[in-house]
Image (tube, coloured by chain):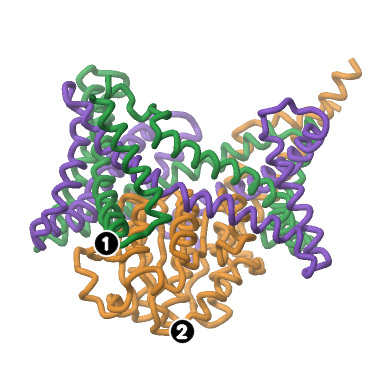
Amino acid sequence: MKILEKMSSIDRRVIFLLVALAVIIPLVANIGLPSRPGKYTIEMYGFIDRLPAKSQPLLIDATYSPSMMPELQPMLKAILRHCFARKVRVMLMTLDPNGPALCEAALREVAPEYNAVYGEDYVFLGFKPGSSAVIMAIGENVRQAFPADNYGKPLSEFPMMADVRNYADIPLVVSIAGSAITQGWVIYAGTRYHASVGAGCTAVSTADYYPFLQSGQLVGLLNGMKGASEYEWLNQRNGYSTARREAGKGMDAVSIVHLLLMLFIVLGNIGYLAGRRAAQKQ
Amino acid sequence: MIFSTNPWVWVAAILTLCIFSFLYRENPFYRFAEHLFVGVSAGYGVAVYFNNAIMPNLYVPVFVHHDYLFIIPGLIGMMFFFRFSSKLGFLILIPLAMLLGMSSGMGIAPTIQADIIRQMQSTIGDATSAGQGGWALVWGIVTFIGVIATLSYFFFSREQKGALKVSANIGIWFIMIGFGASFGNTVMARISLLIGRVQFLLTDWIHIIK
Amino acid sequence: MRRQIPLMLVLVLGIFFFIQFFVPSRLSTNIYQVSLQWLILISAFAIVLAIGSLVNHHLLKIKRRREHWPYSYATLAGLVVMSLLGILGRFPGLGLLDEIYYRLYLFVQAPMDAAMFAILAFYMASASYRAFRARSKEALLLLVSGFFIMLGVIPLGALIWDRIPDIAEWIMMVPNMAAKRGILFGVGLGITATSLKIILGIERSWLGGGGK
């Protein structure tokens, strides 16, 4: 009985050590567990896959800071790879003041892989403060919010922007965000301006966005590292990318840590029930 | 184990370890990294606001395109500086009022449409579309019950007894399952963040992972 | 007067833009478009409040030699160096500064930000172990739902039993969605009510002490 009761008093440092090992070992061992893309990842992927090449650009809003990087940066890179491989044009922007360098890092890594040309295949609009005001301003005219790109060059100088005025010229807005701004895109871009909105979010907020998925206000949803991993897998399966699957590798470690955590919770509960039973007997 | 020869990677790795040292206990390395982080990120923000907002949305329109109308919001925005004046501090209420008034007015109708009307349509639609039949209709009805029950749990205008209590109790079950779903996903989110850092240390710093 | 003018501004602007949504005449649309540009610009200056408070706090800490005051130099140095590099780097011929600014972000700011959130994983594991107890039927429901989601989102879940991802998806789309939608109704109504209260001057906390 004492062993059972002791199960609920494992030292904090032992837990820390086990969590660290559960992360490190799968990463080093290179397990390579198979991915099974979820319904909403496939829907998002399919939407982008159906966009014709060299047509109107899609708008990606990468609103997150480095703290959410492991979940969202692979997502951004995977979507960029998909677009560049299919010659779908991209406008990239951020509503997080900590976002521009992360967007820049993703573009510096991915664009050369596909020889994507700045101004013809993609434009980086940069950061703009005001959140919902920016979303609404794009609905009137993208130049109202972004008179120039991230580097101060007027948008009129880019050939791909010639016919882009507002959401009517943007087939899809993808909100990759670590905050509630995705809801802002649904409310303002989706509802007020009838734009199609897809989302990639941190797993923390995934459950909150299901009402929007079910009502059709979101065309697809990528769920944190899992969503990114599935998107990477779809890219590879369709021959759009040969890059290392960052999120895919991470999911191996997530699997092991989840099992470990579940074990901790079960042990904790066994110890708790044993303790309660012992107290009742006394 | 081959260490990186890139000094930037070393800086990043050492700072990461400084933050991780908090797991042992609070210490000077952690404190230094924490303070540095606050300063660097604030500095990064200042430059980003200046380069991406003040320059293209104020300086260029006024001084390059001579669109002097932009001086007005510029001046209103600058009233935020009065925050540091003991006598004129009240003037920051002007830009605040502009922000609040405009965003509140612009936000009400779309919020009602997106968060309430569309959600209502969807809930009722799925629970009453007999055409879809089978399990889809069953889950549509379950969802309808769940939404009503959850709402009744948060209904505090009447004492929760009788039918309202039953409904509120069903609401708690739905809410608990919802919180469980959030918990399960949150675990993945937090683990992902740790994995990101460990991947950096093992891939970029000590080239263990190829 | 100090409070009346801001309150009047909120009332007029709030009512105007609420009506503008339903009556998008040419004039009102033009005003709306100009106002959006103004809103973006005014929001940009709000950073003054954050940076000003930060600098004030650390200068005061150094001046009064409060606990751990020497670390405040790291904050202030980081602030000055990063902002100067970022702003000056955009000037012609100073591109190198911009590159250093970019690298300082990637190799100094980003790792620390990411690491701070990464350590939460350890605390979450420890807290789940200590506090996640099936003390009641409701808590058990939460636990079971959480377990299915934790198994459903990982590749191993499908290897254990291929129906687990489907069960997890059902939990997300039916009971979870119903609960979150109920909460969303509340949030939507809350936002609407708060906005109306602000516009009508019932909610005045934003006036703070500035109006006194």
**Residue count near mark 2 (Cα–Cα under 10 Å), binned few <14, some 14–19, many ≥20:** few
> Along the line of sight, which residue is nearer the eye, C187 or B112?
B112
> Along the line of sight, which residue is nearer the eye, C140 or C45?
C45
The colour chain A appears in is orange
Expressed as whole percent of the image width and height from the top left, the position of residue B34 reads 36, 36
Seen at 81% across and 67% down, the residue is: B133
> Along the line of sight, which residue is nearer the eye, A2 or B188?
B188
Is A14 left, or right, of B87 in this rendering? right
Expressed as whole percent of the image width and height from the top left, the position of residue B207 reads 45, 61
Quick check: A46 above or below B210?
Answer: below
> Along the line of sight, which residue is nearer the eye, B136 or C107?
B136
Chain letter for the part of the structure drawn in purple: B
Q: What chain does mark 2 sit on?
A: A
* Image mark count: 2
**Residue count near mark 1 (Cα–Cα under 10 Å), binned few <14, some 14–19, many ≥20:** many
Quick check: C62 above or below B206?
Answer: above
Seen at 42% across and 53% down, the residue is: A64
Expressed as whole percent of the image width and height from the top left, the position of residue B29 reads 36, 34
Is A256 left, or right, of B52 in this rendering? right
Name the residue beneath numbered marker 1.
Answer: A144
Residue A97 in view, yes or no: yes
Farthest-out residue, right: A281
Is C18 left, or right, of A24 in this rendering? left
Name the residue beneath numbered marker 2.
Answer: A52
Residue C74 in view, yes or no: no
Q: Amino acid at mark 1?
A: Gln
The colour chain C appears in is green
